[in-house]
Amino acid sequence: MTKRLFTSAVALMLLAGGAAHADEVWTTDIGDVVYETDLDNGMAVLSYPTEGAVRGLAYVAGLAGEYTGRTAYDGIWMEPATEEGICDVEIAAPETGEISNNWGRVEVIFVDPDFPGSFIALRGECFEEPDAMLVARPVTPDSE
């Protein structure tokens, strides 16, 4: 079974079941954003492509388990630490405790409140106000 066919089959099963699970995918200008998992603290973990082989992670507070009535959510994004990191302050990843000096604030604003829905993400570096925008549209069987 090809990867595209498998992805379509999974998406159809999700739609038929009426509920989203931690495998939503959105397409963006930088590549696919993937809803990876929910944390016990109420954060949803989204991954996104970076320039390297490792995907960056966004920890979005209050999004875990929310598949209808989605609004706006705040969180942080993190990428692996580097020698020249962009931030003077290091933080620990909520899921793993891994320390990084490459992080910032993120706001995720859902345009469509129910699964599957589009969102806009605003990203800022370190403590700066989020201002870099990314538009994310859901990958569904109709969009392939």
Image (cartoon, rainbow, N blue to C red):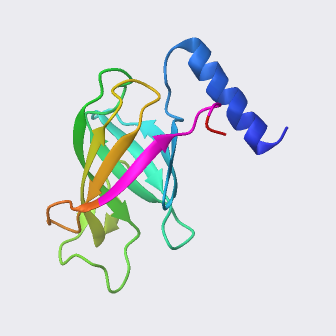
Q: From the viewer's perspective, is residue 38 above or below residue 14?
A: below
Residue 24's x, y, as percent? 51, 36
Is 102 in the magenta?
Answer: no
Q: From the viewer's perspective, is residue 33 above or below residue 116?
A: below
Residue 41's x, y, as percent? 27, 35
Q: Give the residue at x 43% y 47%.
A: 136
Q: From the viewer's perspective, is residue 104 above or below residue 17?
A: below
Image quarter for residue 140? top right
Position of 79 with respect to 92 (left or right) is right
Q: Nearer the viewer, residue 39 or 127?
A: 127
Q: From the viewer's perspective, is residue 135 above or below residue 109?
A: below
Position of 94 with respect to 12 (left or right) is left
Q: Quadrant of the N terminus?
A: top right
Q: Give the residue at x 29% y 21%.
A: 69
What is the chief secondary structure element of the magenta stretch? strand
Image quarter for residue 3? top right
Instruction: Read off the magenta span.
Output: 133-142
Regarding residue 96, the answer to whether it shows in the image is no
Position of 62 with respect to 10 (left or right) is left
Q: Nearer the viewer, residue 71 or 112?
A: 112
Is 138 in the magenta?
Answer: yes
Position of 112 with respect to 27 (left or right) is left
Residue 86's x, y, as percent? 27, 78
Residue 57's x, y, as percent? 40, 55
